[in-house]
Amino acid sequence: MSGDVKSGRDAGDLRIAADVGGTFTDVAVFDEATGAIRLGKTLTTPASLIAGMNRGVEKAGAQFADAGLFLHGTTVAINALLERKGARTALVTTKGFRDIYEIGRINRPEAYNLFFRKHRPLVERALRIEVDERLDAAGDILRPLDDAEVERVAGVLRDEKVEAVAILFLHSYRNPAHEIRARDLLSAMLPGVFVTASHELSQEYREFERSSTVAANAYVGPRVMRYLAEAEDVLDSVDFTGKFLIVQSTGGLYDAAQASRECIRMLESGPAAGVIGTRALCAEIGLGNVIAFDMGGTTAKAGVILDGAELTANQVMVGGYAEGLPIQIPMIDIEEVGTGGGSIARAVHGQMRVGPDSAGAVPGPVCYGGGGSEPTVTDANLLLGRLAPDLFLGGEMQLDVEGARRAMDERVARPLGLTTAEAADGVIRIAVTQMANVVKRVTTARGLDARDFAMVAYGGAGPLHAVLVARELQIPRVIIPNAPGHFSAYGMLVSDLRRDFVRTLFARLTEAPFDVFDAIFKEMEHQGREEIEAAAPGKLEIQLKYAADMRYVGQEHAVTVEVPVDAFARRDSAAIKTAFDAVHAARYGYSSQDEQAEIVSLRLSAIGHIVKPSLAAVPEAQHGIDAALIGIRVVDFGALGGRHDTPVYDRARLAAGHRITGPALIQEYASTTVLPPGDVARVDTQGNLDVAVEVGS
C-alpha cells in the first residue's frame, strides 16, 4: 500500500493503527510525509494485549515515539459482554422500576420453541437498588432526590463490594439533574468504583433499552479502563507524545479519555473499521453496493455499503435478537458469527459441528504447534492443500501438517466414519454455510438481495473462503483488496473523528416547533465541535449531518431519516415528509403520502475529517502471468471440482491487467486467495483482485 498525501502536520510524523483480534494483532503504519504504509502482524498476546501491539509496530519498522497519532480497535468490550466476564455491577434506579431491566419487552421471537430462554441480565436482582425520586415525562421534578438516601445506597454497595455502578432514573433523558447528582455522590463515596449514568450514553426515550445500555457500560467499564490505562502507561514508557484515539462502533474515532467513560461505544471497534475501509475502497474503484465480509481467526463479520454509505443502526441486540440485550447507541450495522480460522471442529452425537468455540491465539490451531489438540478451520484448509505449510505469514511460521492430520482423524474423521479429506472438506462446507447465513442477516433480513451486491473480502481468512461464500449466495463478484489481513487496520487510517448525539422530542410534523428544533440542533452542534476540537490532532474541517427519527402517527417504531439542514431552516415540512416516505418505502416496501407523520428524536453527527492515505495505482503488466508463478500444489476443492494440480502465484509479482483462471491459489504475506475451477481473477489498476464468480443459473 502506498500513495501520495499532503499533510498539514510535520513531515515524518507517523500514524499507527492497531487492530487487536482474538487470534492476530494487525498493525498498519502510515507515513504522512511519504504516503507509504508499512504493515506488521503478530499473534495476539492475551496476557498483555499491548505487548502484541508493540511487537507488531516493531515488525512494521516503526516506533511509537515517532507517531503523532495512535489509532486502536479492540474486542475487549464485546468479549467481556459475550463471555460474561465483566465487573460485579449494581444498578441504581427509580423506586418501583428495578425490574424494568429483567422484564424487558416481553418478546417471544420463537413462539413454539419449548427451549426458549429470555435474556439474562448482567446485574442480578439483589444488586438492583431503588431510590425514591421521580421526574415526569417532561422532565419536571415530582419527587426530589434525597442525598441522604443516595449515601445510604453507597454504604450498601460498599458492603456488597461492587466494582461498577449504573444509574438509570426515569425520564432522565429529558432532565439529567438527578442522575448527575447521584453520580457525583456515588463517585465521591465509592473511590475506585466505575460509576456511569444513562444520560451520558443516550438522551433517548425507552427505559428498558437505556437500562440495558448503561448496565452494559458499567459491566465492561472496569475492564476497559484497566486495558486503556495499561496501554497509556506503555505509550508513556516509549515516549509517545501524540494523540491516542479509539475506533467507535460507528467507525469514527474518539479519544481514550472518552472511551474510558463511554466504553460501550467501542463494542464493534475493529469490525467497524473494516467497513469504513470498504467504503473508502468502493469510492476508489467506483462501486456503490457492496457487502463487507471480514473473516479472522475467531469470528466472521458482515456489513453493507449501500449507495456508497455504510448501513447503520441506532440499536443492536448483543447476543442475538431472541436472547440478547439491547444496546441503544448508534453503530454500523454489523452481524457476526463465531466462525473463524480458529473455530474448533468436533464430532458431537454423530454430527459434525464447527465453532463457536475457538482455539484463539493460545493454544491456537493444532498446526500452529502451540499446544492445540482440537482440529480447526485452519487445520482443514492446510489438509486440503489450500494453505502452504512453509509460506504461512511469509514463511515466518511453519505449519504442522501431521499434527493437524492426527487431530482431524482422531476428533472428527474416525468418529464419523470419514476419510481425512472428507472430514476437512465437511469442516469447510459447514463453516461456509454459517458465514453465508451471517451475510443473509445483513442483506435478506433487511430486504436486500445479496445477488445485487459485490463482496469485498478481507481478514486473514477472508480470501480463503470468500468465493465459496459468494457461490453459496450467488454473488457474482468478489474483490480482494491489497493486504487483506491488515485491512481493518487500514480502515482505521481512513476513519475520521466522530461524535453522535440524539435528543428525544415528540412532535407531529404538521405542528413542528422548528424554533425548538433549531435550539436542540445548535446545542448538539456546539457540543460536537467542542469535543472534536479537544480530541483532534490539529485543526480539522468539521462536517455536520442532521437526521430525525420519524414514524407515521399510530406506529410504535421509527426510522431514521437524514434530512438536509436547509429543510429545517426553510421550515419545509413537506420536504421532510417526502424524505421520510422514501426511507419508509425502502425499509418496509410501502409508504403513505396521505398519512400524518411525527418526529420522535433529532440526531446530529459531527465528523472531523483527518488527512487520509490515498492508494497509488499499480503498474501495468510488462510480463506474462507465469512470472508470478511460484509452484504447483495438489489442492482438494471438494464438491467444487475435486483434486487438482493447482498453480500458486505470488501476489507481490502481479500487476494491473494480469488475469488468472481457476483453479489457482494466490499467495501473499498474511493471506491466501482460493480460486476454484471456473472462477477468473483480474488485477485492477489499484492492485485489487477482482474475481468473477461462477454462480450458475
Image (cartoon, helix red, strand yellow):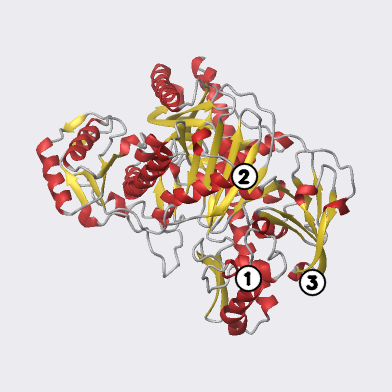
Marks 1 and 2, how far apart in space? 26 Å
Check the image and name the residue furthest to the top: 570
**Secondary element at image label 1:** loop
Q: Which residue matches tag 1? A: 400
Q: Which residue matches tag 3? A: 643
Mark 2 or 3 closer to N-term?
2
Quadrant location of the C terminus?
A: bottom right
Residue visible at 41% across and 46% down? 327
Instruction: Classify 619 as above or below 516.
Output: below
Badge 1 amino acid? Asp
Quadrant location of the N terminus?
A: top right
> Which label belongs to residue 199?
none
> Local crowd at mark 1 within 10 Å, few (<14), some, or many (≥20)?
some
Instruction: Name the front one of labels 2 and 3.
Output: 2
Residue 379 vs residue 416, the one in the foreground: 379
Residue 343 vs residue 19, the one in the foreground: 19
